[in-house]
Image (spheres, rainbow, N blue to C red):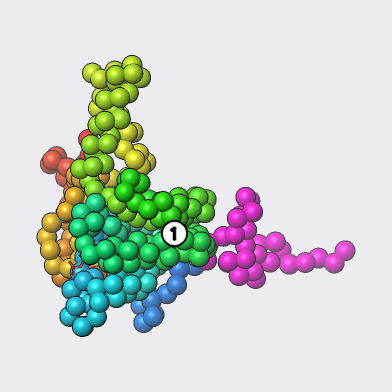
Amino acid sequence: AVRGPHPSAAAALIPAQARHDRTGVPAPRPPLPHHTGVRPPHLPAGRMPRHVAVIMDGNGRWATRRGLPRSEGHRVGAQKALRDVVHGALEIGLPHLTVYAFSTENWKRDLQEIAFLLHTIREDLNGEAGAKEWASYGVRLRWAGDSEGLPTDVVEDLARGERATRHCTRLTLTTCVNYGGRAELTRAAARLARAARDGDIDADRIGTGEFTRHLSLPDLPDVDLLWRTGGEQRTSNFLPWHATYAELHFTDTHWPDVDRRDLWRAVTEYGRRQRRYGAVVSNAQPS
Ligand code: FPP
């Protein structure tokens, strides 16, 4: 019988994107490299954050300074900066990246800007093409926020993005759309109150674990590093429950000028910090 190459040798000849795992799902493509060819830093496993959350601030100022409409800042922020940061996150093996794309306060903006932001979120991320592309890199899309107030087609696209990428395990990219931290906590409290009223839980036994289970994404891990660009130093109603013990990182760069190297710097600095969670020892865990 004619023998072919050893199966593992044969597999090596197949481009990664064409390989399939046991479930028949193609293996993710490797992340796109940075245009300068710069390689990711080596970060010791114990010093890597598990969850980085980002307030992508400064799009409007970036555009205005260039005499451009604010929407151009959002476009570049989504298509260039966010894209590059996600590929940079894949390169360092970050499991969770959460971004603040549209807050409950953003409804106060000009109608045109709101429409553009929602359009960008749909087109570039959760729409059919966006979700397909992210899935090819192993990126699972999730959405945190309130469906109330959002146009139905936006909600449908956000749900479609989640469905189309639910098998992906390399990186979970959670987009906060129509998200407000206090609203999230209030909803969880209302759910708990209803469950207690209906006798499904014992109110005297409600602890942090039970509370977390009533949040809209109960499995979203605690934020290790919260990074805000654009020069402001506040957390603006972003993930108050999850970011209680987050290390804070503020940078002046406007979001459209950010790329993966900024993420790598943030993560490298995080690795040098000592987290104590109120204890004295450096390897303490949150309670
Ligand atoms: C803050 O800048 C940024 C936002 C309110 C929106 C962030 C959204 C994006 C980067 C696009 C999201 C797209 C996807 C695909 C997730 P700002 O407008 O408040 O800027 P300013 O502080 O300079 O006015």
Question: Magenta stretch: dominant SS?
Answer: loop
Of 178 and 224, nearer the camera is 178
Q: Which residues are magenta?
A: 1-29
The residue under label 1 is which amino acid type? Asn
One can see residue 178 in this view = yes
Residue pictured at 27% horizontal, 66% vertical: 113
**Quarter for ligand 1?**
bottom left
SS of the residue under disc 1: helix
244 falls in the magenta region: no
Relative height, residue 161 to residue 130 (above, below) = above
Is ligand 1 less than 8 Å from the beta carbon at label 1? yes
Q: Position of residue 3 (x, y in %)?
A: 81, 65
Kindly identify the residue that appears in the image at 59 percent across and 59 percent down: 26
Magenta residue check for 19: yes
Residue 41 seen in render:
no
Whether 286 is drawn above or below 203: the answer is below
Residue 283 % position (x, y): 22, 45
Residue neighbourhood size for the residue with mark 1, other residues' Cα within 10 Å, grouped as few (<14), some (14–19), many (≥20): many
Point out residue 45 in the picture as x, y percentages from the top left corner.
Answer: 34, 55
Viewer-side residue, 171 vs 229 = 229
At x 44%, y 59%, the residue is 126
Where, quadrant-wise, is the N terminus in this rendering? bottom right
Left or right of 125: which side holds 116? left
Q: Which residue position is annotated with label 1?
A: 126
